[in-house]
Amino acid sequence: MKLVVYIHGFNSSPLSFKANILSNLIQKMASTADFYCPRLSHWPEQAVKSLTDKIGGYSVDDIMLIGSSLGGFYATYLSDYFGYRSVLINPAITPQEGLRSYMGPQKNLYTNEDYDFTLEHLRQLKSFYVPKPRNPERLFLIHTTGDELLDWKIAARHYEGAKRLIISGGDHGFSNFEDYAQIALSFVESGA
C-alpha cells in the first residue's frame, strides 16, 4: 500500500485547506494510496523526526510526499535523504533566513497554540537545508508567480532539473489549489 504524506507549512495543521482537498480527492478517486497528514511540531527537529518515524520503514516507491511552503522544505530534505518522490508547492527554500522576521511570539492559525519562535528554531531549520537536490527528477515543483512570500524564480533555479508547473498569478496560500490537486496526485502516484 502506498502512502501519500501531506506536509503542512509554518503555523498550519492537518486541518489546512490543501490537506482537506488532497484527503477528499484521494477518497473520491478510490485511490490505492492511504493519506497521512500529521500535526507537526513547531520545532523542526521534532517535525522531521515525527515524519521519519512514520515513513522510514516504507520502501522508496511506496511513499509520496506533498509539501507546501515550510512543508516543501521538509519534503526536499526527506526526498534528498531517502529518495522519495515529492511535490513541492510554493516551497520555502531557506526558511532559516526567511523566517527570521517571525522571531518572537507566534500562534498556530489552526490549533491556537502559542509559542516563541527563536534562534534555536532557525538553527534547527538550517540543519535540514539542501543546497542542491541530488535527485531533482524525483521532484515536481508547483509554484504560483503571485506568491507574495516566496519568489518562484528562486525556486525554479533551486530545483533545476525537476518537473515544473509555474502558474501565473495566484498567492502563497494557493487559493485555487483545487484546480491542480489532481496533477499533484498524478505525479506522486504514477511517478510521471
Image (cartoon, helix red, strand yellow):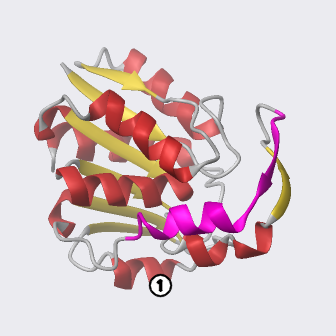
In the image, residue 39 lies at what x, y percent?
58, 31
- Left or right: where 184 falls relative to 25: left
Image quarter of the N terminus? top left
Q: Which residues are magenta?
A: 112-129
Q: Residue at x 50, y 51 (%)?
A: 71
Q: Judge whether residue 113 is colored magenta.
A: yes
Question: From what the image shows, is residue 1 above or below residue 175?
Answer: above
In the rendered image, residue 6, in percent from the top left (x then y), is placed at: 44, 38
What residue do we see at 34% from left, 20% from top? 29
Residue that numbered label 1 is attached to: 153
- Type of amino acid under label 1: Lys
Of 9 and 168, the residue lying toward us? 9
51 lies above or below 87: above
User: Few, some or many C-alpha atoms within 10 Å of disc 1 (few <14, some 14-19, many ≥20)?
Assistant: few
Residue 183 place in picture, x, y as percent: 34, 46
- Visible residue check, residue 171: no
Q: How many numbered badges does the structure rendering display?
A: 1
